[in-house]
Amino acid sequence: MSKVTPLSGFPEFLPSDRIVELQFLDTIRETFELHGFASIETRAVEPVERLSNQGEDADKEIYGVRRLAAGADEDAALGLHFDLTVPFARYVLEHSGKLVFPFRRYQIQKVWRGERPQEGRYREFTQADIDIIDSGELPFHYEVELPLVIADAFRKLPIPPFRIQVNTRQIPEGFYRGLGIEDITGALRIVDKLDKIGPDKVTDLLTAAGLSAETAKQVLRLAEISSTDASFADQVRALGVQHEILDEGLERLSQIMTAANEHAPGLLVADLKIARGLDYYTGTVYETQLIGDEGYGSICSGGRYDSLASDGKTTYPGVGISIGVSRLVHRLISKGLVKASRSTPTAVLIALNSEEDRAEAMRTAIQLRGRGIPVEVAPAAAKFGKQIKFADRRGIPFVWFSTENGPEVKDIRSGEQVPADAATWAPPAHDVRPSIEEIS
């Protein structure tokens, strides 16, 4: 047999960590549904042509898919989707006649990116997306609603304080046009790297792209502006750059900040360096960081797209935001901030006096499971001390015994052992399922 070696960038959680991830997913799903989002799932592959040209990194991020025995002229070139927005736009076009607009969807699936693995950045990972898409026009109030939904989900999870940063693409675009910059997309892509490479390297890249030193400074001055209210607009105007697209962006972001502060003061931060690297974003863009851990980067991002879904006759503008679930859970676990209360769903282990008792133990297990209690029967009859040790290693809190006086159940954490009836006994509610414990 060949030696088994790990593949970098493809995470495989141990059972206890998987419990944390599943509970995060359950909370996120339940929150999305509370806000009226319907679940869909799209295929894992899309034509490479559709996946390409969505940003400077799109081509190199795509994993190609091909049958090993396929002939040279068989099938169109397919690739694994690198996000959930591009396949969602295709889904809307394909099923538009069966959807009711505005369409609110959530989607929780794996995505794949062929990039260099690093801390919290995987080649295969789970995203949880919400989008609202409409036919023809999409009111801006949805751009306020989406971060409120994300905040609702995050407040139910054991995560550190967070900050949702927001910008509109019109602000940097209008500002750059006012400065006379011709390659708007190129400048946006460079500024989007500011948190990763710092202002000095961004300046070098901008000047290498043909900008004067003074123009590069103005670009960075804009990127340095942030506020928790609409005061950012005055700071931008003080830089002396004028353009109608800039005015449009300032007005739109001011409206978003004012509306958001009415519902959740301080939740949003207008941060004018946020650009997002994918080309399909046309308006508001979001990024979310853990306060005190900003160097880790965004754990939740998205934005508005006006022309990603269009069949030539009808355009379906949308706005969406995506939680990087694998990225978030990995960070919390790796920093020792959360853990599962046990590594198995099992709440009760039914011990065996002998193998002859297995049939009766199975009947007891069926009774308890029928009442929603996760149970397993001991793998083999052994001394009770050994069976208790097995339960302790698994994190199973209760062991069920058959004694001369009838069945009894023991809480192996406290040592308390009491008579039990499979028709009525139940563990405390907090012990029925494993929970997530915050580590101070």
Image: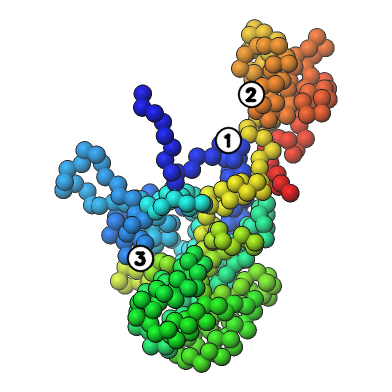
Percent x, y of residue 69: 21, 38
The quarter of the displayed image where residue 393 is located: top right
Q: Secondary structure at mark 2?
A: strand
On the image, numbered disc 2 is attached to which residue? 376
Q: Amino acid at mark 3?
A: Glu
Foreground pick, 416 / 159: 159
Q: Nearer the viewer, mark 3 or mark 2?
A: 3
- Between marks 2 and 1, how big is the CA–CA gap? 16 Å
Percent x, y of residue 183: 35, 79
Q: Amino acid at mark 1?
A: Pro
- Between marks 3 and 2, how big is the CA–CA gap? 52 Å
Q: Amino acid at mark 2?
A: Glu
On the question of residue 139 being in view, the answer is: no
Q: Secondary structure at mark 3?
A: loop
Residue 56 marker: 3
The crowding category of the residue bearing disc 2, from other C-alpha atoms within 10 Å (few below 14, some 14 to 19, many at least 20), is: many
Q: Nearer the viewer, mark 2 or mark 1?
A: 1
Q: Earlier in the sequence, mark 3 or mark 1?
A: 1
Residue visible at 38% across and 69% down in the picture? 279
Question: Seen in the image, is 47 located left or right of residue 29?
Answer: left
Which corner quadrant holds the N terminus?
top left
Q: Is residue 224 above or below residue 433?
A: below
Q: Earlier in the sequence, mark 3 or mark 2?
A: 3
Question: Seen in the image, is 125 located left or right of residue 94?
Answer: right
Residue 15 marker: 1
- Between marks 3 and 1, how big is the CA–CA gap? 37 Å
Residue 248 marker: none
The crowding category of the residue bearing disc 3, from other C-alpha atoms within 10 Å (few below 14, some 14 to 19, many at least 20), is: some
Percent x, y of residue 283: 47, 75
Residue visible at 82% across and 28% down in the picture? 414
